[in-house]
Image (spheres, rainbow, N blue to C red):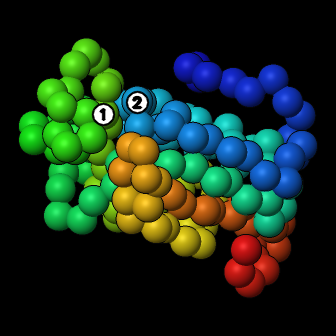
Amino acid sequence: DQMFYLLFAAPSFDIVYLYAVYTNMTAQQVSVYLGEIARVLKPNGRMFATFYVEENVPDYEENPQGYMVEKFGALRGPLHCCRFRRGYVEQLIDAAGMRLLDLKHQCESQSGQSVLIARRSDESGIAGDGF
């Protein structure tokens, strides 16, 4: 029983781009989306995504108090800002059959989101180097 399903055949895409999607989702929803992204990516295909990612925080927090106040002011409404622990995001990506290639912490200038690039492994489990 899956909450979300992309209506594309597997594998269909070399790259999937998700800007400010995971920043407004629960951990369970992110896990489902990552699985679907991995399914529709071609072997060695890339996912470009933004997250709120930090070290030394709980695995997942919805609207963490005092976080990004300089960007947003007070966080309002459900799922306004969902923050993840970096290691937890890596675990979710690995569990989906992808590998984190790069993460730039808070490099997105408007919202302070972290930008990451992950790659789906090829069928043999051997992934190419770099981007």
Up-down: is 17 above or below 29? below
For the point 81% across and 23% down, the residue is 7
Residue 125 spot, x, y in % from top left: 74, 73
Residue 104 spot, x, y in % from top left: 46, 67
Residue carrying label 1: 81
Answer yes or no: is residue 20 visible. yes
Q: Quadrant of residue 40?
A: top right
For the point 46% across and 54% down, the residue is 108
| 126 to the left or right of 96 | right
Nearer to the camera, 71 or 60: 71
| 46 to the left or right of 21 | right
Residue 36 spot, x, y in % from top left: 67, 38
* Quadrant showing the C terminus: bottom right
Query: Disc 1 residue type?
Result: Cys
Residue carrying label 2: 24
SS type, badge 1: loop
For the point 41% across and 37% down, the residue is 23
Q: Are marks 1 and 2 in contact (CB under 8 Å)?
A: yes
SS type, badge 2: helix
Up-down: is 54 above or below 24? below
For the point 53% across and 60% down, the residue is 116
Q: Between disc 1 and disc 2, whose residue precedes?
A: 2
